[in-house]
Image (spheres, rainbow, N blue to C red):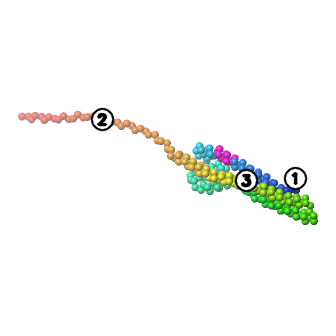
Amino acid sequence: MNLAAIYNTIGPAGCALVVVGCAGVYIAFRTYFYLALVWRNFQHGFLDLENTGESRCLRNNNSDNPLIAIVRDVVKTHSGHSQDIRAEVAYLFHRNFEQTTKSLCWLRLVAMISPLMGLLGTVLGMVRVFQAIADTATPDPAQLAAGIWEVLITTAMGLSVAIPMLIAYYFLLLKFKGFHIEAVEHSYRALELCQGSARHAHAVVPAVPVVPAAPAVKRTVANTPASCPVSPEPESA
């Protein structure tokens, strides 16, 4: 079966559904593998630094992983306090995962327009059937069958594309929301780690060496001999 026969069988709406379905499959698999790679690098990179307690490495980590970048920026911005962490993480999450957000939007669009394209194919097939009836008083059953076939096949194709794409969209969306929760939790943990390191640095003060005092010198006072009592001289007669 050549391309012309396929086009005559499924019609223009069916060809458009094939293109849209292939694009949806590509977007779904690319987004899934990207999120899996991000999570694996996050576990191997950031969690190891967090477990070792090296807060300086959290600030100086130059990884291009989006989750690590979010936590790193939160630590740099809120190192002295932990207020408005959720709002900051939401902003950084949207900025670092902008491409993933767009991919999910495109995937949802594919899931939404596929049934409509199938419905369009149904309408075009019915138009083809009624046109064949109107052209001849006794329509050719082959032409009617071709139009009815186009009606059924485009409807089935639209649903066959929409259902898997909708499942993939919600699966990836739940995984994506899980990333947001992980970013918030690890931001709090990283701040606690940095603040604990700062408190420990202030608490540890080097001991001042104690200089031993010089031994006290005992002064000995010489005993002066007691003055002998002067005996009175005998009075002269």
Q: Which residue is mark 2?
A: 220
The amino acid sitting under disc 1 is: Leu
Q: Residue at x 62, y 56 (%)?
A: 87
The Cα–Cα distance between marks 1 and 3, rounded to whole angstroms, is: 29 Å
Q: Quick check: 76 left or right of 121? A: left
Q: Mark 1: few, some, or many residues within 10 Å (few <14, many ≥20)?
A: few
Horizontal side of residue 219 vs 81, given as left or right: left
Which quarter of the picture shows residue 216? Answer: top left
Amino acid on which the number 2 mark rests in the picture: Thr
Q: Judging from the image, what secondary structure is the residue with disc 1 in?
A: helix
Residue behind mark 3 = 168
Residue 191 position, x and y percent, is 58, 50
Magenta stretch? 37-45
Observer-nearest residue: 209 or 124? Answer: 124
Q: Residue furthest right?
A: 137
Q: Earlier in the sequence, mark 2 or mark 1?
A: 1
Residue at 87% x, 60% y is 147
Q: Camera-side residue: 209 or 130?
A: 130
Tell me the distance, in whole angstroms, between the alpha carbons under discs 2 and 1. 125 Å
Q: Nearer the viewer, mark 2 or mark 1?
A: 1
Return the mark for residue 3. Answer: 1
Residue 54 seen in the current view? no
Residue 164, position in %: x, y?
Answer: 75, 54
Q: Residue at left 8%, top 34%?
A: 236
